[in-house]
């Protein structure tokens, strides 16, 4: 999905979408970006920030790609 | 010629390298070569969700034809790479065609050790999608099932079979406490007991001497002279890296493709390796290391893609090893260095049954790794701590951190680091 996002000029910040039904608490997202993702007491992913500043985009995309069950997505607003 | 990255192997390491190359802005051609005539798929579900019928082949696809086209990744599937010529920088495929490259990524993975007792009908090994589908069909006909090898794959197959309603399941392993070295005896014993709790018989400390068809059944003969009857046998006794196609390439091979800390072949800096087939100099441990797990393949793919796009800013592959296994209702996660060779401390989660963490210490008392059972927040603490060596003094401090997890209030954005 993330390949869709061609970097063209300024627009609204992309947001992270999580599917807690799919989350298996493997925590690869937390290992990649622990300022963005956490695992809550319920054992599923918790977002510490809902949107992705452009400066952080590559790092967050990498964290999203590392989810073994595809529970994370980045969506353009 | 325009630059071209040829990636040989279309499983998780290969697919993630291709995607990461594009994410890093690689402008050349990206070709993904796969031996199987199927779209790339994910392997962890083969012993779990796919085998259980909770996932479909489409659901575990790693890269659809549309996604590949969108990312400008050329798929060359159904044709194995058979030879590498590093002098001419080209890969020969089974159909005789040649693929020139400017950078090559070897991601050919590993394959299961074959059954030393032959493979009469009903004997399975598990590596591919087809293997998983075939095994699932046999399991749905009922038992008895004998699993040879109590490693992660064998244990997961046994657990899945029970979930499918197979009544009579036995796991055989010649080691008295399987996984006792990788996990330590206490942890391994907890996992072994999990089988018994779910009605799976275990025959540990006993080997297999032969598997023979008898009528429509299989006789599994054990080294203590006893015999088990099976409808289906699964042999899961480890894997070997797929390097045979590189035999005359001149690359240094030794239990995998031997690489420097940047995951480049020590023989040729334009050849990189990722995943199960790569044996690289791990900077953290200063040891040649080969890891057969999903997360390492993905981390290594990111590193290799970065190094291809930025050869003047090489990044070492320094990821802390991480693996998981899901068996029955348990989730067990391993991070860093673990096992019987290290001093260990077990911390039980007072808030939940069957939830614990075992911390491991090196000879100087430094925190080197953890096994976490059914305790996601403790896993986060351990991974975060191990990622930043020096952030924690020793195992006693790690223990305090994990013990702090059980009383910590829910995190929020303000409290998170």
Image (cartoon, helix red, strand yellow):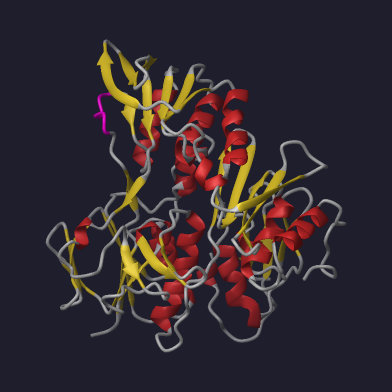
The residue lying furthest to the top in this view is B215
Q: Position of residue A66 (x, y in %)?
A: 55, 62
Which span is picked out in magenta?
B116-121
- Left or right of B352? Residue B203 is left
The residue lying furthest to the bottom in this view is B312
| Residue B88 in sight from this viewpoint | yes
Q: Residue at left 48%, top 73%?
A: B283
Q: Is residue B117 above or below residue B250?
A: above
**Depth order, front residue of A45/B382:** B382
**Depth order, front residue of B359/B242:** B359
Q: Position of residue B179 (x, y in %)?
A: 51, 41
Q: Position of residue B375 (x, y in %)?
A: 71, 47
Quadrant of the image containing the N terminus of chain B: bottom left
**Depth order, front residue of B303/B61:** B303
Question: Main SS of the magenta segment?
Answer: loop
Q: Is residue A67 above or below residue B134?
A: below
Q: Position of residue A64 (x, y in %)?
A: 59, 64
């Amino acid at each position: 999905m993330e390949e869709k996002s061609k970097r063209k000029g300024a627009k609204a910040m992309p947001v992270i979408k999580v599917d807690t039904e799919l989350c298996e608490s493997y925590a690869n997202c937390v290992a990649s970006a622990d300022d963005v993702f956490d695992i809550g007491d319920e054992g599923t992913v918790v977002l510490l920030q809902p949107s992705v500043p452009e400066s952080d985009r590559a790092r967050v995309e990498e964290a999203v790609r590392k989810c073994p069950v595809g529970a994370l997505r980045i969506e353009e607003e | 010629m325009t630059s071209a990255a040829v990636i040989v192997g279309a499983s998780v390491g290969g697919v993630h390298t291709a995607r990461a190359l594009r994410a890093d802005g690689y402008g050349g051609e990206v070709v993904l070569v796969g031996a199987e005539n199927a779209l790339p798929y994910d392997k962890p579900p083969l012993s779990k969700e796919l085998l259980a019928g909770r996932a479909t082949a489409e659901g575990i696809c790693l890269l659809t034809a549309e996604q590949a086209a969108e990312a400008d990744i050329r798929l060359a599937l159904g044709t194995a790479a058979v030879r590498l010529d590093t002098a001419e920088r080209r890969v020969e495929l089974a159909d005789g065609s040649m693929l020139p490259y400017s950078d090559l990524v070897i991601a050919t993975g590993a394959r299961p050790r074959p059954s030393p007792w032959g493979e009469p009908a009903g004997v399975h090994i598990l590596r591919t999608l087809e293997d998983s589908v075939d095994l699932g069909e046999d399991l749905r006909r009922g038992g008895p099932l004998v699993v040879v090898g109590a490693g992660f794959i064998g244990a997961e197959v046994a657990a899945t079979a029970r979930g499918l309603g197979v009544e009579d399941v036995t796991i055989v392993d010649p080691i008295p406490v399987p996984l006792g070295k990788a996990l330590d005896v206490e942890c391994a014993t907890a996992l072994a007991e999990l089988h018994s709790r779910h009605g799976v018989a275990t025959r540990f400390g006993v080997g297999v001497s032969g598997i023979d068809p008898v009528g429509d059944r299989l006789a599994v003969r054990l080294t203590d002279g006893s015999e088990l009857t099976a409808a289906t046998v699964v042999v899961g006794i480890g894997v070997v890296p797929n390097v045979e196609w590189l035999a005359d390439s001149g690359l240094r091979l030794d239990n995998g493709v031997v690489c420097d800390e940047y995951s480049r072949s020590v023989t040729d800096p334009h050849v990189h390796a990722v995943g199960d087939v790569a044996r690289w100099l791990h900077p953290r441990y200063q040891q040649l290391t080969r890891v057969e797990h999903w997360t390492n393949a993905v981390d290594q793919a990111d590193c290799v893609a970065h190094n291809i796009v930025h050869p003047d800013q090489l990044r070492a592959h320094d990821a802390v090893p991480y693996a998981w296994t899901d068996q029955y209702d348990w989730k067990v996660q391993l991070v860093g260095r673990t096992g019987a060779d290290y001093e260990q401390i077990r911390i039980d989660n007072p808030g939940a049954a069957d939830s614990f963490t075992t911390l491991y210490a090196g000879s100087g008392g430094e925190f080197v790794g953890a096994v976490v059972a059914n305790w996601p927040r403790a896993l986060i603490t351990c991974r975060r701590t191990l990622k930043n060596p020096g952030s924690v003094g020793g195992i006693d401090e790690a223990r305090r951190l994990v013990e702090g997890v059980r009383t910590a209030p829910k995190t929020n954005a303000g409290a998170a680091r």
